[in-house]
Image (cartoon, rainbow, N blue to C red):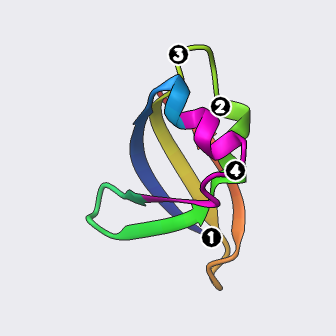
Amino acid sequence: MLEYYFNLRLSYNDCMDYYHGRYSSVQVVEEGGKSIRFSADHLRPFITSLGIRGRFRMLLTPENKFIRIERVA
C-alpha cells in the first residue's frame, strides 16, 4: 500500500465549485514533492462550513488505485 500526506486549505466557496461539478479533479503536492491529481468527489466528506482545512493521508494500492483519503490533523 502506498501512502501520501498533504495539506489542503480551500475556502467554502472553492469547495462548492468542486461540489457542484465545476471542477472534476484536485491536484495537490504531497509532502515529498510529488504532484498528485485525484477526483474531487473524494473530498466531499471533508467539506465543512469553513471549507476544507487540514492534513490528509491518501492511501493507494501498489498499482496506484485509490483506496481512501483520511484526515490526520
Q: Between marks 4 and 3, how big is the CA–CA gap?
A: 18 Å
**Counting residues from the N terminus, which is met first, the one under dot 4 or under dot 3?**
4
Residue 72 shows in the view: no
Tag 1 residue: 1
The quadrant the N terminus occupies is: bottom right
- Secondary structure at badge 1 equals loop
Residue positioned 64% across, 53% down in the render: 40
Residues in magenta? 15-27
- Secondary structure at badge 2 equals helix
Q: Position of residue 20 (x, y in %)?
A: 72, 42
Could you say which disc has been placed on residue 42 in the image?
Answer: 4
> Outermost residue, top direction?
49
Q: Amino acid at mark 2?
A: Phe
Query: Contact, CB < 8 Å: mark 1 with mark 3?
Result: no
Q: Between marks 1 and 2, how big is the CA–CA gap?
A: 23 Å
Mark 3, other Cα within 10 Å: few <14 / some 14–19 / many ≥20: few
Of badges 4 and 1, the one in the foreground is 4
Query: Contact, CB < 8 Å: mark 2 with mark 3?
Result: no
Could you say which disc has been placed on residue 50 in the image?
Answer: 3
Q: Is residue 73 left or right of residue 41?
A: left
Q: Position of residue 71 (x, y in %)?
A: 57, 35
Query: Contact, CB < 8 Å: mark 2 with mark 4?
Result: no
Tag 2 residue: 46
Mark 1, other Cα within 10 Å: few <14 / some 14–19 / many ≥20: few
Of badges 1 and 3, the one in the foreground is 3
